[in-house]
Image (cartoon, rainbow, N blue to C red):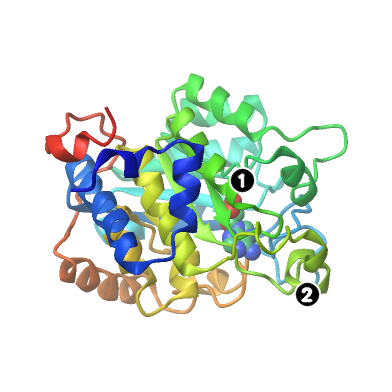
């Protein structure tokens, strides 16, 4: 077990780990993260069926391929029956929950989503997570009342200037995702958030602050994946250079840095549900999923969107599992999880505020 000073996870400590390059030293980070994961959330891997319900989006985020100005996209919006069918598929595959995710699409009305939530509740035992962007208080409350359990809204970066640059507000409506997260927590949602690693303009200090922010907000779910440039976007083209921080400060969007961020996230938020992200699997199709599961993650989100839509939900190019059926994707996945000595969880897999079973691992945090 590592000695305590190594794991003093304040701003300087987290930043030092993010900058660490020595693979022998990093082994201590990997094993600490894996031990804390095992002690606090156990060996079960939760599968959440991801349903990409709409590729329409009203926002102009500089990093995202679905941004409103993206041309040449064949946009779609699933109807209520299609969403319910996908949820039933997730249930058949044995998953404990589904995530309805989409662009910020006013065409998906509050009433329509509420109806879908009630139908999924009626027909399945799935926990329901929403990831539909910045929505009105009224919609968020109605969805919670209809039976939604959780909401994912990444804050993307804790640097407010960078956030404003890459995530322009809608006219007259300042974007404040931290405020929305706090409101949703008050409404009784479990809340999830996250950031991209290596977004142009992200410095080592920013990423360290992001990770400490997860702890300060005691987030229930935290997704951390690499930034993958999309040629449809300003940050995926030649203009991106103007956004970069000076070379010594700019975080690279690479696998090793992402894995360090996942491991550190586990150390600062021992009980959180942390997915091994699709973006990481896209960057390293051979072993990205496994490596995250070995270094802190305990959740995988298999895609259950109908294939005809899935290929059209292009946040970034080359998305992992974009062309396999849910069942095929699932086969590969189960084998890979078992090969790591882990089990597939049954049940909804909410955040569990359990007692720590391994006191040595708990010791990192108290
Ligand atoms: N690369 C990686 N992740 C991205 N996201 C959006 N665009 C990209 C990209 N180019 C992430 C954002 C968003 C989530 C749904 O996908 O963090 O919150």
Q: Position of residue 174 (x, y in %)?
A: 79, 32
Q: Is residue 81 visible from the viewing direction of this image?
A: yes
Q: Quadrant of residue 360?
A: top left
Instruction: Give the alpha-carbon distance from disc 2 to disc 1, as whole Å.
Output: 34 Å
* Label number found at residue 206: 1
Above or below, 42 relative to 31: above
Task: Identify the element where label 1 is drawn.
Answer: helix
Q: Nearer the viewer, residue 12 or 253?
A: 12
Above or below, 260 relative to 308: above
At 33% across and 54% down in the image, what residue appears? 297
Above or below, 79 relative to 144: below
Q: Nearer the viewer, residue 339 or 70?
A: 339
Above or below, 303 relative to 35: below
Within 8 Å of ligand 1, the CB of disc 2?
Answer: no
Quadrant of the snapshot with the C terminus: top left
Q: Residue under label 2, please give it.
A: 72
Q: Quadrant of residue 347?
A: top left
Residue most toward the right?
171
At 41% across and 53% down in the image, what residue appears? 262
């Amino acid at each position: 077990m590592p000695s305590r000073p190594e794991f003093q996870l304040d701003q300087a400590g987290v930043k030092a780990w993010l900058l660490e390059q020595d693979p022998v030293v990093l082994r201590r980070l990997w094993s600490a993260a894996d031990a804390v994961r095992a002690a606090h959330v156990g060996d079960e891997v939760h599968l959440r069926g991801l349903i990409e319900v709409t590729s329409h989006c009203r926002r102009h985020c500089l990093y995202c391929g679905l941004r409103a100005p993206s041309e040449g996209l064949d946009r779609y919006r699933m109807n209520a029956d299609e969403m319910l069918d996908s949820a039933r598929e997730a249930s058949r595959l044995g998953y404990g929950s589904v995530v309805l995710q989409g662009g910020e699409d006013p065409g998906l009305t509050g009433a329509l989503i509420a109806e879908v939530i009630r139908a999924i509740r009626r027909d399945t035992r799935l926990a329901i997570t929403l990831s539909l962007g910045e929505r009105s208080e009224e919609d968020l409350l109605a969805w919670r009342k209809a039976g939604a359990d959780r909401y994912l809204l990444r804050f993307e970066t804790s640097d407010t200037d960078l956030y404003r640059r890459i995530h322009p507000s809608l006219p007259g409506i300042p974007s404040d995702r931290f405020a929305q997260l706090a409101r949703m927590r008050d409404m009784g949602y479990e809340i999830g958030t996250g950031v991209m690693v290596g977004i142009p303009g992200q410095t080592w200090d920013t990423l360290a602050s992001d990770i400490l922010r997860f702890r300060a907000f005691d987030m229930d779910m935290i997704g951390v994946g690499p930034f993958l440039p999309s040629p449809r976007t300003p940050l995926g083209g030649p203009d991106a250079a103007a956004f970069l921080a000076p070379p010594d400060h700019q975080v690279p969007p690479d696998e090793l840095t992402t894995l360090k961020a996942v491991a550190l996230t586990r150390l600062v938020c021992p009980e959180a549900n942390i997915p091994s992200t699709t973006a990481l699997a896209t960057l390293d199709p051979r072993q990205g999923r496994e490596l995250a599961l070995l270094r802190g993650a305990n959740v995988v989100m298999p895609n259950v969107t109908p294939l005809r839509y899935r290929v059209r939900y292009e946040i970034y190019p080359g998305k992992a599992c974009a062309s396999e059926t849910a069942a095929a994707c699932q086969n590969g996945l189960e084998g890979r999880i078992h090969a790591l000595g882990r089990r597939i969880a049954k049940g909804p897999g909410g955040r569990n505020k359990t007692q720590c079973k391994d006191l040595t691992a708990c010791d990192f945090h108290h």
